[in-house]
Image (spheres, grey):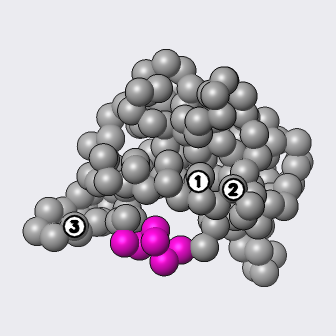
Amino acid sequence: MTIVELTVTDQVQYKTTFTSGLVQHRDCFRISPADEAREPFPTTGQPDSFTLGLLTETNELAGVVSFEREGRNREKVRHKGLLFRMYISAQYSGCGYGRLLMNEVIKRVLELGSIEQINLTVVATNYAAKRLYASLGFTVFAHEKRGIKDGDAYYDEEQMVLFLQTGPA
């Protein structure tokens, strides 16, 4: 497996892979396949706005994750970043590839030196994802009941944070 940075030129492969995840695991995401069809590529390809992909030996996209600095135009929240759209294809799930992608995101964010925390939102019943995030040091700071409504089904969401640098309390 190889981790690569994906850009808008990889949009077709990215959307095919990610939309497959949205269809197969609809209850694990806050966006629907219809939402994704209308969305542009999620990041800008800048050091603080990137999407990573995990490629197999046959150049199949096995997983993706995106990161973006919060507050692009707001100086008071530029110390935070948002990790989003994390997905590993079912046939590669449980093999440690999610951890590989997450570690690479954290490494890149640390290299920026100006981001103090990474936030993410996870569906509260997505136990595998929550275990991974917790094992990397993320902690829950908020729980929203019925944060997602999909048809008649409701899902709670949790927000998690990883503090990279300690600042004043």
Residue linked to disc 2: 10
Label 2, label 1: how far apart the Cα atoms are: 6 Å
Label 3, label 2: how far apart the Cα atoms are: 29 Å
Q: Residue at x 72, y 28 (%)?
A: 2
In the image, residue 142 lies at what x, y percent?
41, 55
Taking the image as drawn, is residue 54 in sight?
A: yes
- The answer to the question of whether label 3 and label 2 lie on touching residues, with beta carbons closer than 8 A, is no
Q: Nearer the viewer, mark 1 or mark 3?
A: 1
Q: Which mark is residue 150?
A: 3
> Which of the 4 quarters of the picture holds residue 80?
bottom right
Residue 46: say if magenta: no
- The answer to the question of whether label 2 and label 1 lie on touching residues, with beta carbons closer than 8 A, is yes
Residue linked to disc 1: 14
In the image, residue 147 lies at what x, y percent?
30, 65
Residue 37: say if magenta: yes
**Magenta-drawn segment:** 34-39
